[in-house]
Amino acid sequence: MNIPRSQARSAARLAAVQALYQQQMEGTALARLLNEFHQHRLGMEIDDDQYAEAEVDFFDDLVAGVDARREEIDGLLAGKLAEGWTLARLDKTMLQILRSGAYELVARADVPTATAIDEYVDVAKAFFDDREAKFVNGILDALAKEVRN
């Protein structure tokens, strides 16, 4: 089954957030994490939920890129939080959404700014309500103004 590239990338973004969440919670090594998602999650049916076919190379780049540049990304994100807030105070899923979005803005010049922000706002809506989605929009928009011209 061939799905449009935009849908495959959306699925890759959602899966990347899930993979990064799992990595943070369980400390799963990167190679094992990627393999587990390739074998058991991407495009599979789990508990009657059909996981969309994801663009695997894009998924791999997101997860590996966030993993490799976490310190840099976290520093950029921390600078966008309100005074008194730290990344540690954020919901763990929210943190992975922001990290993934930040990585795309910093490292994926092929992805238009508006696309990257809108996609992660949509990912946020899968987990949270509109208030948190607006938070994602605000943080990523501020970050984009800093890292993209």
Image (cartoon, grey):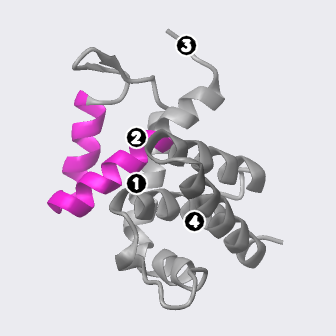
Dominant secondary-structure state across the stretch colored magenta? helix
The type of residue carrying mark 2 is Ala
Give the crowd class for mark 2: few <14, some 14-19, many >=20 residues within 10 Å.
many
Whether residue 69 appears in this view of the structure is yes
Q: Residue at x 41, y 47 (%)?
A: 16
The residues bearing labels 2 and 1 have C-alpha atoms spaced at a distance of: 9 Å
Specify whether 32 is left or right of 82: left
Q: Are marks 4 and 2 in contact (CB under 8 Å)?
A: no
Q: Which stretch is magenta? A: 13-40
Mark in the foreground, 1 or 4: 4
Return the mark for residue 2: 3
Q: Which residue is mark 4?
A: 102
Marks 2 and 3: CB-CB under 8 Å? no
| Residue density around tag 1, few if under 14, some if 14–19, many if 20 or more, within 10 Å | many
Q: Is residue 143 above or below residue 113?
A: below
Which amino acid type corresponds to the residue marked 3 in the rendered image? Asn
Q: Quadrant of residue 76?
A: bottom right
The location of residue 38, given as percent across then percent down, is 30, 34
Residue 18 pos. (x, y %)? 35, 46
Looking at numbered disc 1 in the image, what kind of residue is underneath it?
Val
Which picture quadrant has residue 46? top left
Judge from the rendering whether residue 80 lies leftward or rightward of residue 111; answer left or right. left
User: Which residue is located at x 65 percent, y 63 percent?
Assistant: 105
- Asked whether residue 50 is drawn in magenta, I would say no
State the image quarter where residue 79 is shown. Answer: bottom right
- The residue labelled by disc 2 is 15
Residue where numbered disc 1 is placed: 63
Q: Is residue 50 left or right of residue 39?
A: right
Between the C-alphas of marks 4 and 2, the distance is 16 Å
Question: Distance between the Cα atoms at labels 1 and 4?
Answer: 12 Å
Assign a secondary structure to mark 2: helix
Question: If the image is split into quadrants, where does the C terminus sit?
Answer: bottom right
